[in-house]
Image (cartoon, helix red, strand yellow):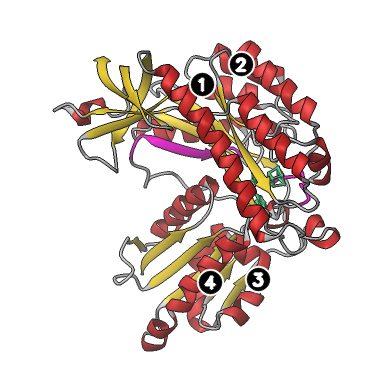
Amino acid sequence: MKILIHTFGCQMNKLDSELVAEALVAAGHEIVADEAEANAILFNTCSVRDHAEQRVLSRIAHLRARKKAEPDLRLGVMGCMAQRLARELFDKAPHLDLVCGTRKFPQIAELLEQSFAGPVLAVEEESLTAPGTLDAHGRSLFSGIQAYISIMRGCNNFCTYCIVPYVRGREESRPIAAVVGEARALVSRGAKEITLLGQNVDAYGKDIGSSLAELLREVDKVEDFVRMRFVTSHPKDITEELVKTVAALPRVCNHFHMPAQSGSTKMLKAMNRGYTREEYDRRLEIIAKHCPGALVTSDFIVGFPDEADEDHEQSVELIKAAKFQNSYVFKYSPRPGTVAEKKLVDNAPEEVKKQRNHELLSAQEEVNCARSASLVGSTQEIMVEGISRRDKTRMTGRTSNNLICVFPAPEDAEALVGKLVTLKINACGALTLIGELQSR
Ligand code: 5AD
Ligand code: SF4
């Protein structure tokens, strides 16, 4: 079959789609990019907010006419929405052939085959601890310089708003040797930047007697890559040892994606985040102490039930005090089955959510503008990632602490991809530093 995979959601989903593609190609199928050419279309989905689910449902609804005209066209939903809604998806979209949950990815090729005999529902309901990873497949389809490796799956935290623990199951770390082996394979295919992925990477190894710090040291033994990153860090699990390890390993980037979600202890408690505002501030201090120059990126939720103006103000104040590299702000979206959805009332009007969303983003923008302006005139080392998608005459890359930089593409642009270069910064936008090549 010619199969197209549409991916929604986080980096983990993008990686899962790559691994599913890998499994499908191993079974003799072909991956295509053009929907018209495809005779199977799979949606890898996200359930974190209602909006993400609605988008997928409308895309699927649009395919109804084509499915009618082409009954052999395979339509499948996989990932978080498949896990969450299971059979219900067939009610919402009766023209679907396959619903494949997060723990059934490895069987995807077989399931697709079976669907010619009738709709297939493959969702692990009993135990989300059943082995379900796609580790068995290689990474033969990988190309480019930025590679992702899943180091663990699932989440044990049950933040009250979050659907992830219900759709991704419990934390499960991959063995160090498997991660290192995958890093080697990716590097041999040209990877220069390796990003280790997990819902909560700081919990890595708890179930196998290891730690993220140890994993970083082991992956760092692999030669011939330039940089390593890891996401997402949970403030309650990030350790001093980890921060020191990041500082000690030059190839590990000085950047932590450590979502605060709120600046108010009252909200953090209601969210079951497992830390207070003071504890979050303490983590920032530890990072600043051992990794000077490191930047932290955060996520925030606005309009969580009972969030008062003063709670919101504390989030604004946190953004200004922490001077985050960036903040991603989300309007609270009740997820069916979560504690917040069952026990709390979604009592912030949409207008209030919008307003708070806007206020956090503008506080962050102020931080960004001030930082960017202060860096004009400085020299920055970046790893060149490629030609800028927005402006083909420019190249783009990032500093170790995740600042985006652009510079005019030289004639031998391709030769710079994946290399460390230094730039002299001479102008800026809020989130972009603009420079010229100083040395390579
Ligand atoms: N509503 C709004 N935002 C959410 N997030 C997770 N669940 C929800 C929800 N129910 C946000 C959190 C998390 C990011 C990936 O998505 O900020 O860090
Ligand atoms: Fe969701 Fe909290 Fe787990 Fe992150 S740590 S995936 S927000 S439950």
Q: Tell me residue 152's x, y (percent).
A: 63, 40
Q: Residue at 55% x, 83% y: name it.
A: 94
Instruction: Please give the residue where the numbered disc 3 appears in the rendered image.
Output: 86
List the single residue furthest toward the bottom: 69
> Do callouts 4 and 3 mark residues in contact (Cβ within 8 Å)?
no
Disc 3 marks which amino acid? Answer: Ala
For this view, does 437 lie left or right of residue 147?
Answer: left
Choose top left, top right, bottom left or bottom right for residue 359.
top right
Q: Is residue 43 magenta?
A: no
Q: Which mark sits nearer the N-terminus, 4 or 2?
A: 4
Disc 4 marks which amino acid? Answer: Leu
For this view, does 357 lie left or right of residue 336?
Answer: left
| Residue 420 visible from this viewpoint | no
Q: Tell me residue 268's x, y (percent).
A: 79, 40
> Do callouts 1 and 2 mark residues in contact (Cβ within 8 Å)?
yes
Q: Which mark sits nearer the N-terminus, 3 or 1?
A: 3
Q: Which mark sits nearer the N-terminus, 4 or 3?
A: 4
Say whether mark 2 is within 8 Å of ligand 2. no
Q: Which mark sits nearer the N-terminus, 3 or 2?
A: 3
Disc 4/disc 3 C-alpha distance (Å): 14 Å
Disc 1/disc 2 C-alpha distance (Å): 9 Å
In what element is the residue under mark 3?
loop
List the single residue furthest toward the left: 411
Instruction: Please give the residue where the numbered disc 4 appears in the rendered image.
Output: 57
Instruction: Please give the residue where the numbered disc 1 appears in the rendered image.
Output: 252
Q: Is residue 145 magenta?
A: yes
Instruction: Please give the residue where the numbered disc 2 appears in the rendered image.
Output: 245
Q: Which mark sits nearer the N-terminus, 1 or 4?
A: 4
Relative vertical location of residue 400 with respect to residue 331 in this rendering, above or below: above
Q: Which residues are magenta?
A: 144-160
* Numbered marks: total: 4
Disc 1/disc 4 C-alpha distance (Å): 39 Å
